[in-house]
Image (spheres, rainbow, N blue to C red):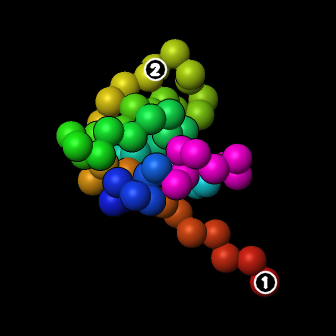
Amino acid sequence: MNAQRAKEIASSPVMANVLCEGTPVYIQHVDAQNETARIYPLHDRQAEREVPLYTLQEQIQYTE
C-alpha cells in the first residue's frame, strides 16, 4: 500500500477493509518518511505494532 492511501484510510471515519499478513487491521498512524504504519488487529487492540507499508493490503468490497 502506498503512504498516501494509508494516510487516507487512517484519517477516514469510514472503516476500510485492510489486511496485514491475512489479518484484518486498523491503521492508527502512518510514517511516510520511513514507509511504515502503526496498526493493531481488529480482534486485539493491545497487539499494536509497526509494520512496513508494503505488508498492508486493502480489500475492495464490491456492492451490487
Quarter of the image with the C terminus is bottom right
Please say whether residue 23 is one of the residues in the magenta stretch.
no
Q: Mark 2: which secondary structure?
A: loop
* Depth order, front residue of 24/31: 31
For the residue carrying disc 2, how many other residues have a C-alpha within 10 Å: few (<14), some (14-19), or many (20+)? Answer: few
For the residue carrying disc 1, how many other residues have a C-alpha within 10 Å: few (<14), some (14-19), or many (20+)? Answer: few
Residue at 50%, 33% in the rendered image = 28
Q: Mark 1: which secondary structure?
A: loop
Instruction: Using the image, determine if residue 50 lies above or below residue 8.
Output: above
Residue at 35%, 59% in the rendered image = 1
The number of numbered badges drawn on the structure is 2
Q: Is residue 7 left or right of residue 1?
A: right
The type of residue carrying mark 1 is Glu
Q: Give the range drawn in magenta.
A: 8-15
- Name the spot of residue 16 as percent of width and height, x first: 61, 54
Alpha carbon distance from label 1 to label 2: 35 Å
* Residue farthest toward the bottom in the current orientation of the protein: 64
Question: Is residue 55 in sight in this rendering?
Answer: no
Residue at 37%, 25% in the rendered image = 49
Q: Identify the residue position indicated by label 1 in the image.
A: 64
* Depth order, front residue of 6/58: 6
- Name the spot of residue 50 as percent of width and height, x first: 32, 30
Question: Is residue 3 in sight in this rendering?
Answer: yes
- Name the spot of residue 12 as percent of width and height, x first: 63, 50
Instruction: Using the image, determine if residue 9 lies above or below residue 23.
Output: below
The type of residue carrying mark 2 is Ala
Tag 2 or tag 1, which sits nearer the N-term? 2
User: Which disc number belongs to residue 47?
Assistant: 2
- Name the spot of residue 36 as percent of width and height, x first: 29, 40
